[in-house]
Image (cartoon, rainbow, N blue to C red):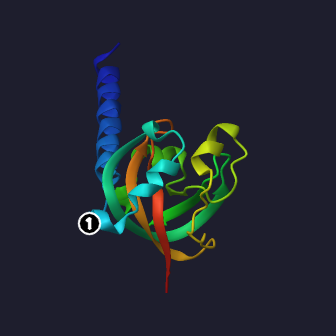
């Protein structure tokens, strides 16, 4: 390999590392604020399907943003995709694999078709009312990393407030 070729390869590697470092700083995966524990309902954890897959970053926080998607999951949860106002709540996996959305999960929104999830929702249905796509909302709950997907999310959600 010629000296010029080595220089081009080195410059490309440095550029890629620089872009990665800048993205890592922009999408640091940090909650915008820490709320008192009393703001979040700890009893909701009893209804989280496979809670060991979630690594808690902040036990109670709130995130504001615009609802971009709604999805009824097989575990009974309502997944709400949020375009967060503070992009720092996203990590690189949120950006690359979740469409730059913060997933927020309302546990036991509906009867779970997945039989393994049924015991977690037995006798419980969430009182959180799902917002509509386009609503600007404030979501309060635990800020976690979903180890199966690698992205950050609010799960379980204590409340969703539609803002005006």
Q: Is residue 102 left or right of residue 117?
A: left
Q: Position of residue 90 (x, y in %)?
A: 40, 53
Can residue 117 be seen here?
yes
Give the residue pinned by disc 1. Answer: 36
Total numbered labels: 1
Where's the N terminus, which quadrant? top left
Q: Position of residue 128 (x, y in %)?
A: 55, 69
Q: Position of residue 139 (x, y in %)?
A: 45, 68
Tell which of 53 and 153 is nearer to you. Answer: 53
Q: Position of residue 69 (x, y in %)?
A: 62, 62
SS for callout 1: loop
Q: Is residue 71 left or right of residue 135?
A: right
Place residue 11 in its image quadrant.
top left
Can residue 28 be seen here?
no
Q: Is residue 118 left or right of residue 23?
A: right
Tell which of 159 and 154 is nearer to you. Answer: 159
Residue positioned 48% across, 49% down in the render: 46
Q: Tell me: residue 2, above or below residue 65.
A: above
Residue positioned 49% across, 71% down in the render: 160
Q: Is residue 51 left or right of residue 70?
A: left
Instruction: Looking at this view, name the residue that lies furthest to the top.
Output: 1
Tell which of 16 and 22 is nearer to you. Answer: 22
Instruction: Looking at this view, name the residue that lies furthest to the bottom.
Output: 164
Tell which of 126 and 65 is nearer to you. Answer: 126
Mark 1 crowd level (few <14, some 14–19, many ≥20, 10 Å Cα) = few
Residue positioned 34% across, 41% down in the render: 20
Instruction: Looking at this view, name the residue that lies furthest to the right.
Output: 113
Q: Tell me: residue 104, above or below residue 1.
A: below
């Amino acid at each position: 390999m010629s000296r010029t070729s080595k220089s081009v390869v080195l410059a490309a590697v440095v550029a890629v590392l620089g872009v990665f470092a800048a993205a890592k700083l922009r999408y640091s995966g940090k909650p915008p604020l820490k709320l008192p524990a009393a703001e979040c309902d700890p009893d909701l954890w009893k209804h989280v399907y496979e809670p060991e897959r979630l690594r808690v970053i902040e036990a109670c926080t709130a995130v504001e943003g615009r609802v971009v998607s709604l999805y009824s999951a097989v575990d009974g949860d309502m997944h709400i995709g949020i375009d967060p106002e503070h992009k720092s709540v996203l990590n690189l996996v949120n950006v690359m694999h979740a469409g730059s959305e913060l997933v927020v999960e309302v546990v036991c929104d509906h009867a779970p078709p997945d039989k393994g999830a049924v015991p977690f929702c037995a006798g419980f249905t969430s009182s959180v009312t799902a917002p509509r796509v386009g609503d600007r909302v404030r979501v309060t709950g635990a800020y976690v990393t979903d180890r199966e997907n690698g992205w950050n999310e609010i799960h379980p959600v204590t409340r969703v407030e539609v803002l005006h």
